[in-house]
């Protein structure tokens, strides 16, 4: 493999990996607080893409206005899902809420099919963001550099929020010990709602960047990113936001480099993500950055 | 869960020992009667002029097998496994490969020729179901060794991962599985008798197994692993047994599904397939055999009945020209409502028994018009 | 609360089935309206609808469509097929995607319902004895595509295929056979991708690194091709990209935009090459209704309807399925919007493979028409 070709693969991987990372944060936040694999995260992401699309196509909003509104609506959708489908089950066995999450994802996908139709729509291209640049021997869409920057920026912002703000500290407290946090007077409902708001807003940002990069919107567009990014979150150590970003990068690079170095085995690519996941789970059950907890007796 | 268990205990202790003796006699008689009625109903269905009715009836039976397979591991053992679709795929491909006529096999492998021994090998349908189940169980053993050490959600994801790996393997093993081309012309062996025969056998097995000492050990593992272990229940051994039996049954169910559908492809065994079965199990109640059986009927028939929602609807005052996908929206919304408001499903961990039915009827009669049924 | 909900649930489950009107000829429409092939299903439904508007009656009876959505899923497809059978259809039209055709094939055969697929090109579709198709088959399309590549003087062709699609892998197989048998041309690389994939940059980087003269994209749906073309151009590849009939759909241009310029694909017909009055009427009415040029699958489904009507007329019965089937199988020299249809002994149409090139404004120009060998 020549150097320039490796560089091209590297930049390809960079943009995929940072998209994975961005979505993985949402998973990890919800898991950290509720110990819930939010299977509906991929579908919330999908709805975010449609919202942004219709903001421009139907209401003729300037793209940045449409994007901001779409991110807010997506965030509210996440909060609504929590309020309607997860909160009533908070004291139920964990498996009930997990199944509820699967049902929410199933519902959103079907709902989108009826609402927006099954035919793929085309996400708008914003030349400011999607122009191609020639950097020496490789060609890079501007987006390839924007996505990692946005991801890192959001991660830093999130760290600030979690460490320095009252809401963030409440989130960490709830994630550490649910009951103790409640006893300390933390408004559990509000804190959990905020977690879903932020997690889903991140899904909204991810959806817009994804749509700009892969401009095809259809009701099942969220299912594969959903599973992949969940794997990324587990790889990094679920519940840990930095871990999620790390996991996203590990997964994205592993997948792309596997195909790059073993092109003949490209048919096995989807197995790579899962084999990686299982290996990590066996060696480091809590993921790359997760804390190993022992089951209390 | 807690309150229900106490309930069952109370109701058992409340009810006088003399009744319990008679229960065995009349439950046998009633069960036999039910089987006879079932036989006639099924014969009536098979002769139905409407081709859809026997098809859906057969699908109900297949879903019973699949739901019970999943219920054994998820409901009775408390291990959240999402690997069902992979095991189904193994069973489905085994049955398909071993029952398709050799001439058809030759013409269907258009990309790469089929591997040698399979080319001409055909076996009786019943045997292929068992072989498919055994291969699935063997695979479950290999998957279980690493996976069953994981707990909770991690196990769910690892099993889901293996299920996808199986699918990717099927997609790539051109000369064995015909890859993306899938398998066609699978003989329609999944008749009413076969599907219901297998379903009844699985129900009977589950009823006996879950009340045996093994079954009680599994429930102990579900309720409290640490307590179960300290009582001398080998965690790994029992989990593995449950996982393998579940995979075996899923393989058998997959084999029936292959014969039912006539054509299979790897895309039938995505994660969605696992979710579909999980929904039946949840609706019926995790840890209830009768719940799974009844939910299999409700979900399968309900999904088919809701098909009218996809077509044009004319209610006189309100007309639509047919919205494709409407039925799935209604179906998934119903499912969500059931999960949120009836978190234990139809039955929770309870079972429908003849003594229970009789008791309820007695109660109903005794209480007269108060109308409160427990 | 729970009780009220329980009652509501039961009430909803009991939504009564609505009786359909009598005295009509019921024709089943067996298409994926939702799921990953929804785009293809929609194109074909447009064709059926337009054809029914033009020819609403046969043998003096009005035609009624009964639509069953296969959800692009194999088990759903066979249930949808059974549901059509149970609603008493005399014949069925559909489906997009050979895999879905095959799921219905056994059900229709068991019930004795003749079926016509407009675009299912996988050779095994018509083996059931009740299925006919009015399109060519992949063993004809694959070599025709190879012939195109040879004719263009390509020396090296990079192949990328959707490994989950029976259509895409089958087409590559027939394509490859002819390439392998020809001197001076070779396949420089083969990359596989999955149905849900959206990122093809790695496969394309790999393929481009072998410096091919052209890239052959065998995909399951036009939208996927759109993404491939877009990403190939973004990577700086400006050589030719070509593919089979699944590239024919509005999504290719919608997604790839100007990048789609120069893409060549084989298809069933070209609406810009009006063959006869039927084509002219179909195309102009379609344009009036949808404000665009009909894609080939739409014209083919229009023709599938016409072929069925012609067969019912020749059979002189709208109830005897066997007679209708035999009349369909005997179709010879029937002229539709997309050209002449003659079915051979395997119930496949013998017709030319048409090559068109996409232009920067989204329209297409006719390149060649390759007659069957």
Image (tube, rainbow, N blue to C red):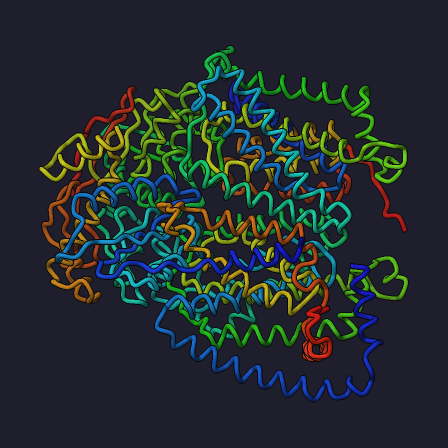
Residue B347, compared with residue A161, is above or below; it is below
A32 and A2: which is toward the camera: A32
Name the residue rendered at 51%, 70% in the picture: B128
Percent x, y for residue B250? 59, 63
How many labels were placed on the picture? 0
Residue B210, compared with residue C120, is above or below; it is below
Q: Could you tell whether C68 is left or right of C142 in the image?
A: right
**Quadrant in which the C terminus of chain B is drawn:** bottom right
A25 and B107: which is toward the camera: A25
B361 and B40: which is toward the camera: B361
Residue B101 can be seen, yes or no? yes
Residue A47, compared with residue B285, is above or below; it is above
Name the residue rendered at 70%, 89% in the picture: B25
Q: Could you tell whether C323 is left or right of C6 in the image?
A: left
- The image quarter in which residue C368 lies: top left
Name the residue rendered at 29%, 43% in the picture: C44
- The image quarter in which residue C216 lies: top left
Percent x, y for residue B43? 44, 80
Residue B117 can be seen, yes or no? no
Percent x, y for residue B284? 63, 62
Q: Could you tell whether B151 is left or right of B369 in the image?
A: right
Name the residue rendered at 75%, 45% in the picture: A90
Residue A140, compared with residue C104, is above or below; it is above
- The image quarter in which residue C149 lies: top left
Percent x, y for residue C88? 30, 63
**Quadrant in which the N terminus of chain B is drawn:** bottom right
């Amino acid at each position: 493999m020549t150097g320039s070709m490796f560089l091209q693969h590297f930049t390809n991987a960079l943009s995929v990996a940072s998209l994975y990372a961005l979505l993985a944060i949402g998973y990890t936040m919800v898991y950290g607080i509720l110990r819930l694999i939010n299977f509906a995260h991929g579908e919330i992401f999908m709805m975010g893409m449609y919202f942004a699309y219709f903001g421009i196509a139907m209401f003729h909003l300037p793209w940045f206005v449409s994007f901001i509104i779409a991110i807010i609506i997506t965030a509210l959708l996440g909060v609504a899902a929590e309020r309607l489908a997860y909160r009533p089950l908070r004291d139920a066995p964990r498996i009930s809420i997990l199944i509820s999450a699967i049902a929410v994802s199933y519902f959103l996908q079907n709902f989108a099919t009826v609402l927006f139709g099954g035919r793929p729509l085309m996400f708008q291209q914003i030349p400011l963001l999607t122009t191609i640049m020639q950097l020496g021997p490789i060609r890079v869409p501007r987006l390839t550099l924007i996505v990692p920057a946005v991801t890192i920026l959001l991660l830093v912002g999130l760290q600030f929020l979690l460490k320095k703000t009252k809401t963030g500290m409440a989130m960490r407290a709830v994630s550490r010990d649910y009951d103790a946090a409640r006893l300390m007077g933390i408004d559990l409902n509000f804190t959990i709602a905020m977690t879903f708001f932020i997690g889903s807003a991140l899904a909204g940002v991810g959806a817009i960047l994804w749509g700009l990069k892969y401009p095809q919107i259809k009701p099942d567009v969220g299912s594969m990113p959903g599973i992949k990014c969940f794997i990324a979150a587990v790889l990094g150590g679920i519940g840990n936001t930095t871990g999620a970003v790390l996991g996203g990068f590990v997964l994205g690079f592993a997948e792309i480099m596997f195909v790059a170095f073993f092109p003949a085995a490209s048919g096995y690519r989807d197995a790579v993500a899962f084999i990686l996941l299982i290996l990590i789970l066996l060696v480091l059950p809590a993921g790359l950055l997760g804390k190993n907890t022992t089951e209390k007796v | 869960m807690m309150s229900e268990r106490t309930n069952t205990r109370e109701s058992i202790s409340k009810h006088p020992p003399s009744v319990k003796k008679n229960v065995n006699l009349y439950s046998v008689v009633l069960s036999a009667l039910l089987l006879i009625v079932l036989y006639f109903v099924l014969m009536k269905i098979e002769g139905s002029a409407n081709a859809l009715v026997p098809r859906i009836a057969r699908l109900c039976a297949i879903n019973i097998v699949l739901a019970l397979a999943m219920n054994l591991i998820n409901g009775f053992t408390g291990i959240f496994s999402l690997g069902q679709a992979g095991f189904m795929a193994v069973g489905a491909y085994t049955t398909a490969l071993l029952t398709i006529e050799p001439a058809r096999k030759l013409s269907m492998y258009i990309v790469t020729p089929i591997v040698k021994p399979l080319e001409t090998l055909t076996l009786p349908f019943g045997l292929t179901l068992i072989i498919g189940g055994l291969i699935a169980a063997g695979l479950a053993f290999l998957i279980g060794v690493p996976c069953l050490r994981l707990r909770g959600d991690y196990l769910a994801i690892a099993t889901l991962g293996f299920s996808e790996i199986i699918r990717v393997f099927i997609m790539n093993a051109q000369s064995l599985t015909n890859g993306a081309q899938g398998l066609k012309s699978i003989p329609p062996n999944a008749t009413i008798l076969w599907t219901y025969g297998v379903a009844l056998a699985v129900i009977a097995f589950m009823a006996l197994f879950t009340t045996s000492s093994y079954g009680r050990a599994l429930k102990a593992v579900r309720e409290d692993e640490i307590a179960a272990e300290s009582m001398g229940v080998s965690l790994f051994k029992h989990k593995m047994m449950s996982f393998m039996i579940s995979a075996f049954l899923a393989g058998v169910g997959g084999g029936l599904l292959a014969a039912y559908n006539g054509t299979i492809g790897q895309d039938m065994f995505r994660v969605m397939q696992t979710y579909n079965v999980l929904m039946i199990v949840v609706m019926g109640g995790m840890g209830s055999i009768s719940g799974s059986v009844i939910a299999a009927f409700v979900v399968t028939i309900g999904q088919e009945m809701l098909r009218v929602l996809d077509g044009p609807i004319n209610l006189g005052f309100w007309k639509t020209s047919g919205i494709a996908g409407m039925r799935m929206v209604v179906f998934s919304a119903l499912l969500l409502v059931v999960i949120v408001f009836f978190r234990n499903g139809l039955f929770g961990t309870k079972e429908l028994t003849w003594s229970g039915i009789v008791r309820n009827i007695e109660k109903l009669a005794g209480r007269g018009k108060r109308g409160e049924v427990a | 609360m729970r009780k009220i909900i329980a009652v509501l649930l039961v009430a909803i489950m009991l939504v009564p089935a609505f009786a359909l009107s009598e005295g009509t000829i019921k024709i089943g429409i067996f298409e994926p309206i939702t799921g990953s092939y929804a785009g293809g299903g929609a194109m074909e439904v447009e064709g059926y609808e337009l054809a029914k508007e033009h020819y609403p009656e046969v043998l003096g009876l009005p035609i009624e469509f009964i639509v069953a959505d296969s959800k692009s899923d194999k088990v759903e497809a066979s249930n949808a097929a059974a549901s059509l059978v149970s609603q008493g259809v005399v014949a069925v039209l559909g489906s997009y995607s050979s895999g879905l055709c095959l799921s219905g094939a056994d059900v229709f055969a068991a019930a004795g319902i003749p079926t016509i697929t407009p675009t299912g090109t996988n050779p095994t579709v018509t083996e059931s004895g009740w299925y006919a198709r009015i399109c060519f088959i992949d063993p004809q399309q694959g070599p025709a595509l190879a012939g195109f590549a040879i004719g263009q003087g390509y020396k090296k062709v990079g192949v990328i295929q959707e490994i989950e699609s029976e259509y895409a892998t089958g087409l590559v197989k027939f394509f490859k056979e002819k390439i392998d048998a020809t001197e001076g041309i070779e396949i420089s690389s083969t990359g596989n991708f999955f149905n849900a994939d959206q990122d093809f940059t790695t496969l394309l980087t790999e393929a481009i690194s072998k410096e091919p003269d052209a890239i052959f994209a065998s995909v399951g749906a036009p939208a996927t091709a759109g993404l491939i073309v877009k990403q190939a151009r973004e990577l700086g590849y400006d050589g030719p990209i070509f593919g089979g009939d699944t590239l024919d759909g509005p999504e290719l241009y919608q997604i790839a935009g100007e990048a789609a310029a120069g893409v060549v694909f084989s298809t069933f017909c070209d609406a810009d090459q009006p063959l006869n009055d039927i084509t002219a009427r179909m195309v102009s009415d379609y344009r009036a209704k949808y404000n665009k040029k009909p894609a080939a699958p739409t014209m083919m489904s229009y023709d599938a309807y016409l072929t069925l009507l012609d067969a019912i007329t020749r059979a002189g019965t709208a109830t005897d399925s066997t007679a209708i089937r035999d009349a369909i199988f005997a179709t010879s020299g029937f002229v539709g919007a997309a050209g002449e249809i003659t079915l051979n002994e395997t119930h496949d149409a013998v017709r030319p493979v048409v090559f068109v090139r996409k232009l920067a404004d989204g329209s297409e120009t006719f390149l060649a028409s390759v007659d069957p060998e």
